[in-house]
Structure formats: structure tokens, C-alpha cells
Image (cartoon, rainbow, N blue to C red):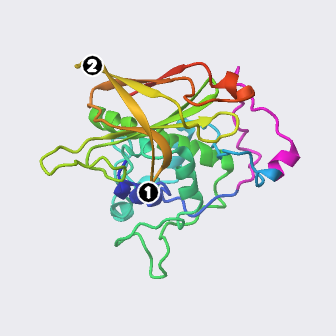
């Protein structure tokens, strides 16, 4: 994902909707969708443990509930967001203010839902520099719709933004770079990939005539505590449509994104799957941890 895109989306996802919204539900809007059938609830935690860990569980992260992209699309049309932001092919620019807001086509895979939600709630959290985005007071020119949206509408609108994609090539490009996360065995695993030349992870060429490579990052955390889990042998099998599978060994390392297992490797555009194997812990473990981290875990991420 590109830094420039990050800045653009901060303003773009406001969608002409403004700085925020009323979190209280309107009686005529309905209720949030129920959890998926069979979804396992998290383990209960005591109030004392919450207080000891600073008020939230260790490794806690706010997760936006799932929304309805179809309803979100209707809201996008109802609020005439395409007066400022184009979405091809459904919402062409209508002229006038349409030249101000950045195009949103293909933006859905660039950022997590929670980031889009924050941008809608507070477009001044990050302001895009440039003419047409900042007012004389130095704040975002996005209008304020906080009294016009409920929380459920926010969730649906974000779901629509997340559903946006470009053409076939753009779709693969964005999805391949979007972080993916799964829970398997005792681990919560997140995979990220940085393309050649994007910088920031130590994968620039060592020699002047060498080619830059991409960088594959695997973040492994204890699913129970949220703490990073080091000392695991981690390998990745990379499968593509038109080339033979490759097996890459990832090494523990620390970078701008924190501790992760990484490898300098370039994923081709036709990559379809990345399969990870987390081996048994390579250092002595004690107590319950000895049983939890003893068995290898394999999990796959679709890359298309």
C-alpha cells in the first residue's frame, strides 16, 4: 500500500459526509445484524484483569461490526456523495464540486474498515494537503453530517466502501497488498506484503545493479493474550497460476511495523495462495505453554 494513497483516502472516505455522526440508533433504522451462526464468542474476562491490563484485554483491537454494502450504496446515492467523489462505473462525477474530492474507485482494499470509519467520524484526524481539501482555517472542507447518520448507517456505508474495487488487475493488486488475518490453533496470524520499491522494510537492493524485491511479513501473536510469539520456525509456500510453487523461510526481525517474521521475496501478479507453516517453538516452553506451542500449525491465505 502506498503512503500517498493513505493520505488520499483519509479525506476521500469522508465521502462528503462530514466530521461525524450520532452514535445513537434512530428508531426507524432497524438493528445491527446478529452474529453469524456458529460464531464462537470470546472467552470472558474479569474486571480485575481488565484493570490490570490498562482497561482493555492485552492485544485488544476495536473491530467494526459487519455491515450491508447494498444499504451503504443506497446511502451513498441518497447523500449525493458523487458530487465530490466518483466511483466508476456506478457513480460518475456530477460536475461542480465533483472536481474536489478524490476518486474512490478501487479504494476499498487499501485500508481496514476501522480506518474508514474513523475518517468518516473525524475527517480532521488526518488532512490531505493540497488545493481543494483544506479551508482557510486549516481544517478539512468536508461538511458535517454527524446529526444525519446513525451508527448502523456508518457501518453500512463503510461496508460499501470496503466493497469497492477497480478492474481485474487493480483488484488483484489491491487485494494482494491488503493485510489478511486468521486465527489458527493458539495463534492469531496477520500477513502483509510490500511491493518492490515501496521501501520501509529493508528490502532495497544491496548492490547498485541488483533489483529491488518485495517484502513478505507474517505477524504471529498468541490468540489468548495478543502478545507476539517469537522463536517459531516459519515457512511460506507461494503458489501462482503460471509458475512453480516456491518455499520461502521467514526470519524473525524487527522493523517499523514491529516484530515479525519476514522474507525479501517478490510475489508475481498471478500469485493465488500463500500457505504458512508455523513449527513448534524452538526454545523450551513451560506449563500450559508447552502443550499449546508444541504442534506445527498450517494455514492458507487466498491471494487474489
Other-residue count near label 2 (Cα within 10 Å), few / some / many at <14 / 14–19 / ≥20: few
Q: Nearer the viewer, residue 164 or 190?
A: 190
Secondary structure at badge 2 equals: loop
Residue at the farthest front position: 284
- Residue 84 visible to an observer of this rendering: no
- Residue 128 visible to an observer of this rendering: yes
State the residue position of label 1. Answer: 12
Question: Which residue is located at x 30 percent, y 35 percent?
Answer: 265
Question: Which residue is located at x 34 percent, y 73 percent?
Answer: 131
> For residue 196, what is the image quadrant?
top left
Q: Residue 17: where, in percent of width, then height?
A: 53, 58
State the residue position of label 2. Answer: 241
Does the magenta segment cover residue 35? yes
> For residue 249, what is the image quadrant?
top left
Residue at the farthest left position: 209
Relative vertical location of residue 52 with respect to residue 268 in this rendering, above or below: below
Q: Residue 104: where, in percent of width, then height?
A: 39, 49
* Span of residues in magenta: 23-51
Q: How many marks?
A: 2
Left or right side of 98 for 290: right
Q: Residue 142: where, in percent of width, then height?
A: 49, 66
Among the two numbered marks 1 and 2 on one chain, the one whose residue lies closer to the N terminus:
1
Q: CA distance from mark 1 to mark 2?
A: 34 Å
Relative vertical location of residue 93 with respect to residue 189 in this rendering, above or below: below
Left or right side of 97 for 20: right
Amino acid at each position: 500500500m502506498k503512503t500517498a494513497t493513505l493520505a488520499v483516502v483519509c479525506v476521500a472516505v469522508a465521502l462528503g459526509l462530514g466530521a461525524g455522526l450520532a452514535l445513537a440508533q434512530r428508531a426507524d433504522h432497524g438493528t445491527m445484524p446478529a452474529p453469524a451462526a456458529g460464531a464462537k464468542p470470546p472467552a470472558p474476562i474479569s474486571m480485575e484483569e481488565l484493570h490490570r491490563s490498562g482497561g482493555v484485554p492485552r492485544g485488544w483491537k476495536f473491530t467494526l461490526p459487519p455491515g450491508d454494502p447494498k444499504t451503504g450504496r443506497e446511502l451513498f446515492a441518497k447523500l449525493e456523495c458523487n458530487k465530490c467523489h466518483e466511483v466508476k462505473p456506478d457513480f460518475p462525477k456530477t460536475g461542480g464540486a465533483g472536481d474536489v474530492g478524490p476518486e474512490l474507485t478501487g479504494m476499498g482494499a487499501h485500508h481496514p474498515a476501522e480506518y474508514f470509519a474513523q475518517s468518516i467520524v473525524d475527517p480532521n484526524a488526518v488532512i490531505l494537503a493540497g488545493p481543494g481539501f483544506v479551508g482557510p482555517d486549516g481544517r478539512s472542507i468536508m461538511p458535517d453530517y454527524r446529526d444525519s447518520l446513525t451508527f448502523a448507517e456508518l457501518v453500512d456505508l463503510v461496508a460499501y466502501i470496503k466493497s469497492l474495487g477497480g478492474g481485474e488487475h487493480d483488484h488483484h493488486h489491491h487485494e494482494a497488498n491488503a493485510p489478511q488475518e486468521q486465527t489458527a490453533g493458539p495463534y492469531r496470524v496477520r500477513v502483509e506484503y510490500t511491493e518492490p520499491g515501496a521501501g520501509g522494510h529493508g528490502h532495497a537492493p544491496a548492490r547498485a545493479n541488483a533489483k529491488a524485491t518485495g517484502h513478505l511479513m507474517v505477524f504471529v501473536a498468541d490468540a489468548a493474550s495478543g502478545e507476539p510469539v517469537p522463536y517459531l520456525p516459519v515457512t511460506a509456500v507461494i503458489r501462482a497460476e503460471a509458475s512453480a510453487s516456491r518455499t520461502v523461510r521467514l526470519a524473525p526481525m524487527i522493523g517499523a511495523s514491529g516484530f515479525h517474521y519476514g522474507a525479501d521475496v517478490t510475489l508475481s501478479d498471478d500469485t493465488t495462495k500463500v500457505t504458512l507453516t508455523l513449527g513448534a517453538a524452538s526454545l523450551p516452553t513451560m506449563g500450559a505453554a508447552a502443550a499449546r506451542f508444541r504442534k506445527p500449525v498450517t494455514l492458507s491465505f487466498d491471494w487474489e
